[in-house]
Image (cartoon, rainbow, N blue to C red):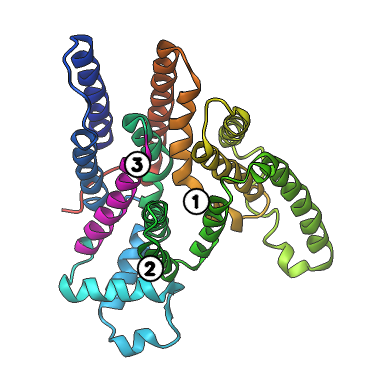
Amino acid sequence: MIYELLILYIISFSYFFKITRRNKLEIIMDRDFFLVPLFLLLSLIMGFRAISVGVDTLNYYHTFMQISKMNFEDLLIGFTYDDAEIGYVIFIKLISMLFDDYFAFQIITSFLFCFFMIFFIRENAINYITSSVVFIALLYLLSFNISRQMLAVSMLAYGWCLYAKKKYKGAFLISLLSVSFHYSAVFFVVVYFVYYLRNNKFFVDLFPLLMLIFVILFDIVMSFVEKYFVYYSDYYGNTRDIQNANMSKYLWLLEFLMSLYIIYKNKVFDAYHKYIAMISMMSSVVNYISLSFNYFERIGLYLYPFLILLFDIFGLGFKNKYICSFYYFSVCVCFLFLFFKSTKATQYIYSFFF
């Protein structure tokens, strides 16, 4: 019922906005009027969930309880605890010193994750409702399972907003902090590199070919590794295959084609839009590779925030306002259905911790 409440809020707001415009009231949708209540609703649902909701929530509970009982000296030895990076360990310890209760920690991390992601949408999205729906379907439920990495993802999304505003010190500090939460976050440097080259027309036009070459070379290299380095071959081709990816592979293909269209449609999309398309294309390629090399599955998560913007900016390509409206409506319906279907999985059956 709790997830249906979230969907109802989005639908109700969309209908209200449509009615006000139909009556020709000169009301421009204030993004905060939609995003602030959404932020609170998402944070409360995520923060007030029981430890049975989410695959790893119980593990995070045990980690918090054990770290809260240790002193700083013991925690800093070796710079990790139970495979958790030092920044995350210190974060847990500091929260436990203020609130000796796991659910206080869960509420705080939930509010932080939702704040960073809603801020990212607020600063970058054109259609806030569509972008929010895509976020809820692609990223929100994942944070119930791998909250430590998803917190790092959200921090990097926030840091990128600072970087785009030329607040380089703030962007560097929060990026460094995210790496201290999850070392794989260092991959995000690629996003900054592509951003630096976004105005280079030659690089932009060549980017799809570079992605294709990357896939081909990766398959060649991994075939060599699989043959001559048996130990490392255990990480290759041992988790999923393309038959088991279900609908995901079609979504990745759609993302790739949408990105391709934006990159080469010069008269409609500017350098910023093409940059979003390049990162989204990279995401689809990384996800494809993850079918045979499972490490890439986690790396690809750092690119997911830009997929939110991909489905948003693609609507700019429609000159007819009715077709454009139908496109955004269709995106919302499809991703709300994806979200609703995902909530039926056993690990997402909701209950409150109290």
Question: Which one is nearer the viewer's eye here, 341 or 277?
Answer: 277
Q: Position of residue 248 (x, y in %)?
A: 56, 36
Of residues 299 and 159, the one drawn nearer to the viewer in this rendering: 159
Q: Is residue 164 above or below residue 275?
A: below
Q: CA distance from mark 2 to mark 3?
A: 21 Å
User: Residue, x 62% and y 46% (percent of image)?
Assistant: 200
In 3D space, how far apart are the residues under numbered discs 1 and 3 (Cα atoms)? 16 Å
Placement of 286 over or under 263, stated as above or below = below
List the residue tagged with mark 3.
Answer: 121
- Amino acid type assigned to the residue bearing label 1 in the image: Leu
Mark 3 residue element: helix
Mark 2 / mark 1, whichever is N-terminal: 2
The amino acid at mark 2 is Leu
Tell which circle, 1 or 3, labels the residue nearer the N-terminal end.
3
Magenta residue check for 107: yes
Please indicate, yes or no, whether residue 50 appears anywhere in the rendered image.
no
Mark 1 and mark 3 in contact? Answer it, CB < 8 Å: no
